[in-house]
Image (tube, rainbow, N blue to C red):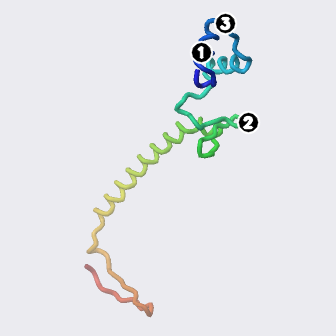
Amino acid sequence: MEWCGVSKATAAAWKKGTRKPSRRAVKLFSLFAQQKVLPDEFEGWKFNRAGDLVTPEGSTLTQGMIRAIPLLYQQISSLKCELREATGKIENLELELDPAAYEQVLIDSSKNVIRLGKK
């Protein structure tokens, strides 16, 4: 019963019926039974008055932000695929280019064009 701040003896008395839990304890039990109490893995996390989840570091996550997480993962996956495709196209274009077909040009510090001819 550590999560509601009572001793094991008090919890045992509640369970036996020799002692009645406070209204606050009953409310906490009710919330726990409805899975409205965060598990131990979320120690330091809390909800603010607006119903947003607040991290231990103080970042606020709205319900909309949390619901969007799976969509963001899908978008990231899609963008990774597009990046792989674009990278492949660039590599193919680089292979198709014939550097000997292009004239090399240098521009010196006086902005004069110096033609070096073809490779």
Circle 2 residue: 49
Q: Residues within 10 Å of mark 1 (few under 14, many from 20)?
A: few
Q: CA distance from mark 1 to mark 3?
A: 11 Å
Image coordinates for residue 42, horizontal then vertical, percent: 56, 34
Q: Is residue 46 visible?
A: yes
> For residue 18, which numbered disc appears in the image?
3
Q: Residue at x 63, y 40 (%)?
A: 54
Q: Residue at x 60, y 25 (%)?
A: 3
Contact between labelled residues 2 and 1, with CB atoms less than 8 Å apart? no
Residue 29 quadrant: top right
- Of marks 1 and 2, the one in the foreground: 1
Image coordinates for residue 31, horizontal then vertical, percent: 66, 21
Q: Residue at x 27, y 69 (%)?
A: 98
Quadrant of the drawing holding the N terminus: top right
Image coordinates for residue 67, horizontal then vertical, percent: 59, 35
Circle 1 residue: 9
